[in-house]
Image: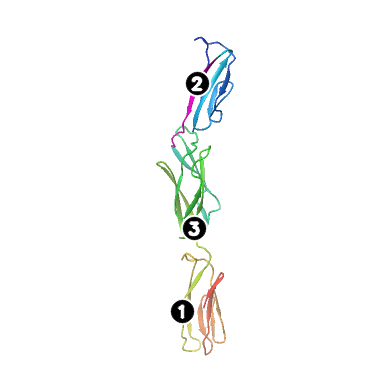
Amino acid sequence: SFADWRLGGRAGGHIIPNAAITWTSSAPETASVDDAGLVTAATVGDAVITATGGDVSATAAIDVQAAEPAVLEIVSGDEQSGMVATALAGPLVVRVTAANGFPVAGAAIVWSGSGSFIAASTTDENGLAQATWTLGTVAGVQSATATVGTLTIDFTANAAAGVAAHIGVTPSSVLLESIGATQALSAQVTDAHGNTATEAVVWSSADEDIATVSSDGIVSAVGNGEVLVTATAGAVSTA
């Protein structure tokens, strides 16, 4: 966000060619100066540049100010995939630059959107800021927004459902009135946040001499009696 300036020296109102001039800065951490009088700003603040030639010297006051953010762009982290309510593998990274293309340090970035964010509050000396995004609890495409001043830019992520946490079986009870009669059961598998989970359902019968169940949940009466049919998905099951 800062620029360079070249300073020159003269004595008695007349330019002295090839004069030996020594350049110094009172605050090189703010603005440094090289042997040719080129001043380079490093951070916001004040510095005094002194040119010394022989027994005479002159000074120039330097006031380094932060440039206004003009461009906000995505560096990395867009279009990732992850699981609901978990942090994405890579951080969201943005860059802020001024109208002259130089990076803007110290710009306050505000992060918002689905889920939550752990972020540094300001850009570094390269104009970069990043955030760790923990996705929200709803499966599907989620969005996050980085804002600095009036500038905004959006990230998206694909949030997959979590692991199976609950199974509901419909109907919950069945009466088969004759040997060979059948009834289709269906299972609804959801994660801890109510999203449809993707784990496959495995059906089993507690007594296959009374009733059998197919891989797709069709119960068939084999003999007389009562039996529990269980649906299992991942680490959870219901009967």
Question: Over which residues does the magenta segment extend?
Answer: 57-69
Callout 3 amino acid: Ala
Q: Residues within 10 Å of mark 3 (few under 14, many from 20)?
A: many
| Depth check, front residue: 115 or 30 | 30
How far is the residue under mark 1 from the one under mark 2? 86 Å
Query: Residue 111 versus residue 145: which sits nearer the camera?
Result: 111
Of marks 1 and 2, which one's residue comes earlier in the chain? 2
**In 3D space, how far apart are the residues under numbered discs 1 and 3 (Cα atoms)?**
31 Å
Residue 144 shows in the view = yes
Residue 116 on image: x %, y %: 47, 54
Picture residue at 50% right of the left edge, 72% below the top: 167
Most foreground residue, 3 or 153: 3
Distance from label 2 to label 3 (Cα)? 57 Å
Count of labels in the image: 3
Vertical comparison of 237 with 66: above or below: below
Q: Secondary structure at mark 2?
A: strand
Q: Which mark is residue 60?
A: 2
Can residue 60 be found in the magenta stretch?
yes
Q: Which class describes the residues within 10 Å of circle 1: few (<14), some (14-19), or many (20+)?
A: few
Label ID, residue 172: 1
Please name the residue shown 46% across and 79% down the image. Answer: 172
Q: Which residue is mark 3?
A: 159
Name the residue at 51% across, 68% down: 165
